[in-house]
Amino acid sequence: MTTHAQKSTESTESTESAESTQSAAYGDSLAGIYDLLYPPSPEAGLVADFVHGLRPAPATLLELGVGTGRLAVPLAERGFRVHGVDSSAEMLRKLAENDITSTITSSVGDFAVSTVGRRFDVVLLALNTLFMLPSQEQQIAALRNIREQLADDGVAVLEMYDPMVFHGLDEPTVRVHHLAADSLVIDTVQVSRSQQTALVVHTVLGPGTVRKVPEVSRYAWPSEFALMARLAGLRITGRFSDWTRTPVTEGAQRHICVLEREA
Ligand SMILES: C[S@@+](CC[C@H](N)C(=O)[O-])C[C@H]1O[C@@H](n2cnc3c(N)ncnc32)[C@H](O)[C@@H]1O
């Protein structure tokens, strides 16, 4: 386990696994273009408002799979004391560049198997990142780690897509994202309904270069997620379809769940 130091250094407690290496490869491959794939948008401010409504700044906040700080940086600007964990050292390097508050601390680790050794008022796992863990067992392990890192009166916030986004696809699908005048990403998506997985191959085309970055997303149904959370000692106290707290209704494309420690 390596530890990445920005403004402060913390170690994570874990066992290295093949999956850590895989998720690090994903992050390391996409770190250079991540901010083009997910450019700054008003959504980050809505996330900060949402979290502030649950536990106001200067609450302590742990973001798992923090990436380049799309959310962590605006949260830190809002006054939250943010620590980010990511399996990719490259993502954390970009996070350090983007952190204009110079307050965000970070460590390299796999959130399915590691903890940072202290507890937080808020734990955030956004943008479907739980589904990047390729098995139900690992997803439950991650939820247990979240529980362990929550203060007694802390809240966890998880954002996940509704599985029908992929499960409903009848054949392999292609999506194109323009990055810049001379680069784009083509995503091919292939679903295994029996495995509850979507294999997304990101083909990155730049000037004179082609790279392929595979990503397996193991999706969980909302009822399955609720059961996994209970097994991990967490209970769902809120469920919304967007960051403005719109209730989940039929056809909602995502679920934002608020969880607290089971007594
Ligand atoms: C979809 S990105 C989300 C980044 C950021 N949270 C956001 O909302 O923009 C997922 C991030 O999680 C990281 N990641 C994936 N699996 C991980 C794992 N098991 N442990 C730690 N980080 C992981 C990736 O390297 C990547 O930076």
Image (cartoon, rainbow, N blue to C red):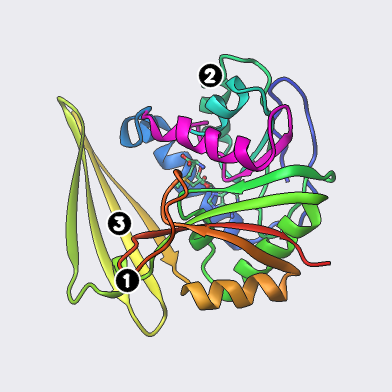
The secondary structure type at the circle numbered 1 is helix
What residue appears at the point 30 percent right and 67 percent down from the top-left corner? 251
What residue appears at the point 70 percent right and 44 percent down from the top-left corner? 122
Answer whether labels 2 and 3 touch (C-beta < 8 Å): no
- Please tell me how crowded label 2 is: few (under 14), some (14-19), or many (20+) other residues with Cα within 10 Å: few
The secondary structure type at the circle numbered 3 is strand
Q: Residue 232 at x, y = what percent?
A: 72, 70
Q: Ligand 1 closer than 8 Å to the CB at disc 2? A: no
> Mark 3 or 1 closer to N-term?
1
Image: magenta residue range: 41-70
Q: Which mark is residue 97?
A: 2
State the CA–CA distance, disc 2 to disc 1.
36 Å
Q: Please tell me in which quadrant of the rendered image residue 107 appears.
A: top right
Q: Residue 203 at x, y = what percent?
A: 25, 48
> Mark 2 or 1 closer to N-term?
2
Q: Residue 21 at x, y = what percent?
A: 57, 53
Q: Which residue is mark 3?
A: 201
- Please tell me how crowded label 3 is: few (under 14), some (14-19), or many (20+) other residues with Cα within 10 Å: some
Q: Which residue is mark 1?
A: 164
